[in-house]
Image: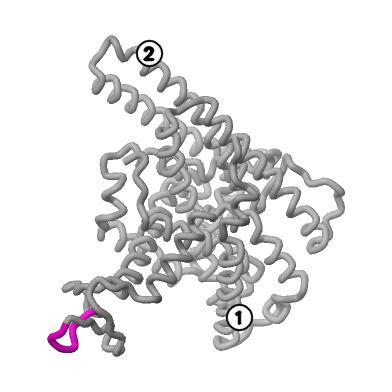
Amino acid sequence: MAGERVEELDRYKGLLIFLVVLGHFLLPIKDSGMALFSRSFYGIYSFHMSAFIFLSGYFFQQSFVKRGRKVSSLFSTLLYDLLCYFLLKTLLHPVDMFCYGEKAFLPDYLHESSTPWYLLGIFFWQVACLPLVLLHGKRMGIKSQENDNQVKFKGQRAEVLYLLFLILLSLMAGNLDAGGKIQDFLALDRVFGFAPFFYLGMLLSFSSVSSSIWKKKNNGFALLGGGFLFALLFFFPEGKGYTRIFYGTWYQRVSKEAILPVFQNYPIFLRLLYIPFALCIAYFVFCLLSFWILPFAEGHIDRENIFLHRDKPSDKLSVGGSGFMRKPGESSPLRKAIDKYLSRWGKYSLVIYLFHRPFRDIFLKMGGYQYFLYTKKGGLEQASFFLLLLLISTILSFLLGRKSLYQICKKRW
């Protein structure tokens, strides 16, 4: 329901922004030929931005409805997104000059293929929602002529049809750069590529099951997503050519990959398949996060969970026979810590997104990946370095995901 806050989504959003940071740290070694790095990277990229954008659309719709779909409020949001884009481009340019030898004195604000693209995407996806303001105004204007419920239904149906039209338009727009001239102009390839996820998030917010879907898990979708993720990781060498679609790029670039002829000729079909593929994996990870945290944290017995049982008739619980005991209703310290930081990172995800990349670039410039770039290493070395990247990503999320930094970027209009 619009305006209802789902606590689990805050934690999930925190996990997603953490995966964004980790994914960017894995990016320089994704094609190193070492399985742990490559499969972890593509496993993350198979769903993390799609899920993040889906939630962006979901929360935008709720906020949009709560504010009454006012033009002034939407323009304020658009201005904020645009300013954040210019801020991030300006912030990253000196880093690009230092780390990558960029020669231009000023950033190229018209072309983007790196981190700031998401802010351009948010801007354009919301610009396309301006007609919804007009639809709302027209609906309000005929309230005196029809029953309120009928007006609400017709207005909502018109909005749903408009959002479906935007999804169809974005799918067809993947062919716009057939001549290779647009490329990364205003990040339009990713704007169109990921637009369906934003508008599907908005559509879910319309639905009567928008709240229950987060609380009552759908095992079918979760298992399907788990199967998709397993297939991607297990058959990765054979399916790597299909991962180009993960980046939301133009169809002409997808067509050049080693994929089936039907997808080379009609890459729109691959994008159509990718949408449920990514969303099912995202839902699987969401359910996994809930399952992994909750059974170890809640002070009650879950009869369906084999990891939680009583050692003896008492009011205490043992987790997995580990000897860890607590009273019913008492949250574990681990649960409290995980909840606290994931929720905080979810709340301040924009700050983490804006400021984390320079640290990755400097780590690369200072030779942090040098040992792994040219020769394959053993499993122990890979695991050790992967744990290091996990630790760095955690520390960065902890340092950047805080209210004091958020207030620097906080909207004042």
Closer to us: 374 or 143: 143
Residue 269 at x, y percent in the picture: 44, 45
Quarter of the image where the C terminus is located: top right
Outermost residue, top side: 145
Q: Is residue 41 above or below residue 379?
A: above
Precedes in sequence: disc 1 or disc 2: 2
The magenta stretch spans which residues? Answer: 308-314
Q: Tell me: 56 left or right of 356.
A: left
* Residue 284 position by quadrant: bottom left
Decide if residue 22 is in sight here.
no
Verify whether residue 321 appears in magenta: no
Q: Say what secondary structure mark 2 lies in.
A: helix
Q: Which mark is residue 270?
A: none
Q: Say what secondary structure mark 1 lies in.
A: helix
Decide if residue 96 is in sight here.
yes
Residue 186 at x, y percent in the picture: 67, 40
Residue at figure coordinates x 50%, y 46% from the top left: 267
Closer to us: 244 or 69: 69
Residue at figure coordinates x 26%, y 49% from the top left: 212
Q: Which mark is residue 385?
A: 1
Residue at figure coordinates x 82%, y 58% from the top left: 97
Tell me if mark 1 has few (under 14), some (14-19) or many (20+) residues whose alpha carbon lies within 10 angstroms of its own.
some
Q: Amino acid at mark 1?
A: Phe
Residue at figure coordinates x 71%, y 61% from the top left: 358
Colour scheme of this structure image? one colour
Residue 328 at x, y percent in the picture: 22, 75
Q: Amino acid at mark 2?
A: Gly
Quarter of the image where the N terminus is located: top left
Q: Tell me: 146 left or right of 41.
A: left
Q: Which mark is residue 141?
A: 2
Tell me if mark 2 has few (under 14), some (14-19) or many (20+) residues whose alpha carbon lies within 10 angstroms of its own.
few
